[in-house]
C-alpha cells in the first residue's frame, strides 16, 4: 500500500459549490411567480411573506448609475456578513477591488439586458468558492430598474471578508415587445438564449 493510495482516502478540499444552495431556488421561484407573461415583476408586487425562510439573505437595490446598485433593504445574514448596516451603501462595498469591475459589468447587464445573473464567490481570506449571489431584475413605478438579490452560503460564513468573483453566469430574458420598445436604443441583448451560460471564469 503506497502513500499515494492513502492520500486518496483523505477528505479532498472542495473546489466547486454544490449545484443548489439554500435560499436561491426559492427566491428565483418567487420572482418567476410574480412575472406577468414575459414582463419583469414590479417592485410593488414584492411581498416579504412570499420569501419567508430566506428573508435573512435577501436584499433589494436601486440602480443609481451605470453598473452601480445601492442597497435599499438587506436581510440580517448580509448585515452579519458585512459586520455593519449596509443599507444606503453600494453593493460593491462587499467586494474586493479586483472584482468590482466584473460586478459592475454584471449589474449593468441585469439592469439593461435585462438578465438574471449568478455569481460564484470566494473570499480574500481563504481560497475556493463558498457563496453564490443571485441577481434578479425588477421594474419600478417610474420605469426604472431595481435588483432583487439573494446570497447563499455553501458552508460557514467568512464574516467581514471581501468577496471575489470566481465565475459568473448570465441569462438574458426575452421581454414582451412593448417592454423591449421601452428600452434605450443603445442597449442590445447579449444573446438570444434562455439558459445560463458561463461568460467568465477567473483562474
Image: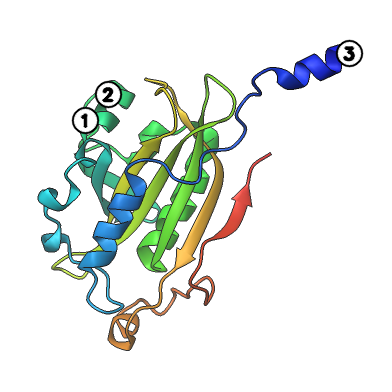
Residue 74 seen in the figure: no
Q: Secondary structure at mark 3?
A: loop
Q: Secondary structure at mark 1?
A: helix
Q: From the viewer's perspective, tell me whether residue 110 is left or right of residue 167.
A: left
Disc 2 vs disc 1: Cβ atoms closer than 8 Å? yes
When the figure is inspected, residue 90 is found, relative to residue 9, above or below; the finding is below
Between circles 3 and 2, the one closer to the viewer is 3
Disc 3 or 2, which lies upstream in sequence?
3
Which label was assigned to residue 76?
Answer: 1
Residue 109 percent across, percent down from the top left:
44, 61
Circle 1 packing at 10 Å, graded few (<14), some (14-19), many (20+), is some
Along the viewing direction, whichever of 85 and 21 lies nearer the viewer:
21
Q: Quadrant of the N terminus?
A: top right
Residue 136 seen in the figure: yes
Q: From the viewer's perspective, tell me whether residue 122 is left or right of residue 156.
A: right
Residue 117 percent across, percent down from the top left:
44, 55
When the figure is inspected, residue 169 is found, relative to residue 183, above or below; the finding is above
Q: Secondary structure at mark 2?
A: helix
Which label was assigned to residue 80?
Answer: 2
Q: From the viewer's perspective, tell me whether residue 48 is left or right of residue 80.
A: left
Marks 3 and 2 sit apart, C-alpha to C-alpha, by 46 Å
Marks 2 and 1 sit apart, C-alpha to C-alpha, by 6 Å
Along the viewing direction, whichever of 94 and 7 lies nearer the viewer:
7
Figure quadrant of residue 40: bottom left
Circle 3 packing at 10 Å, graded few (<14), some (14-19), many (20+), is few
Which label was assigned to residue 2?
Answer: 3
Residue 90 percent across, percent down from the top left:
31, 40
Marks 1 and 3 sit apart, C-alpha to C-alpha, by 49 Å
Circle 2 packing at 10 Å, graded few (<14), some (14-19), many (20+), is some
Disc 1 or 3, which lies upstream in sequence?
3
Query: What's the residue at 29%, 20% (across, down)?
Result: 83
Amino acid at each position: 500500500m503506497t502513500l499515494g493510495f492513502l492520500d486518496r482516502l483523505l477528505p479532498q478540499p472542495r473546489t466547486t459549490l454544490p449545484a443548489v444552495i439554500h435560499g436561491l431556488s426559492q427566491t428565483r421561484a418567487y420572482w418567476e411567480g410574480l412575472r406577468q407573461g414575459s414582463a419583469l415583476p414590479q417592485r410593488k408586487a414584492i411581498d416579504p411573506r412570499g420569501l419567508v425562510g430566506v428573508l435573512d439573505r435577501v436584499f433589494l437595490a436601486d440602480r443609481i448609475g451605470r453598473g452601480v446598485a445601492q442597497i435599499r433593504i438587506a436581510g440580517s445574514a448580509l448585515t452579519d456578513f458585512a459586520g455593519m448596516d449596509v443599507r444606503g451603501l453600494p453593493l460593491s462595498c462587499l467586494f474586493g477591488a479586483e472584482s468590482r469591475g466584473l460586478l459592475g459589468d454584471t449589474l449593468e447587464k441585469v439592469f439593461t439586458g435585462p438578465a438574471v445573473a449568478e455569481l460564484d464567490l470566494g473570499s480574500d481570506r481563504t481560497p475556493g468558492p463558498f457563496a453564490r449571489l443571485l441577481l434578479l431584475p425588477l421594474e419600478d413605478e417610474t420605469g426604472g430598474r431595481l435588483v432583487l438579490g439573494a446570497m447563499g452560503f455553501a458552508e460557514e460564513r467568512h464574516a467581514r471578508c471581501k468577496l471575489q468573483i470566481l465565475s459568473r453566469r448570465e441569462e438574458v430574458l426575452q421581454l414582451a415587445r412593448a417592454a423591449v420598445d421601452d428600452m434605450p436604443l443603445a442597449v442590445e441583448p447579449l444573446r438570444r438564449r434562455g439558459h445560463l451560460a458561463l461568460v467568465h471564469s477567473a483562474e
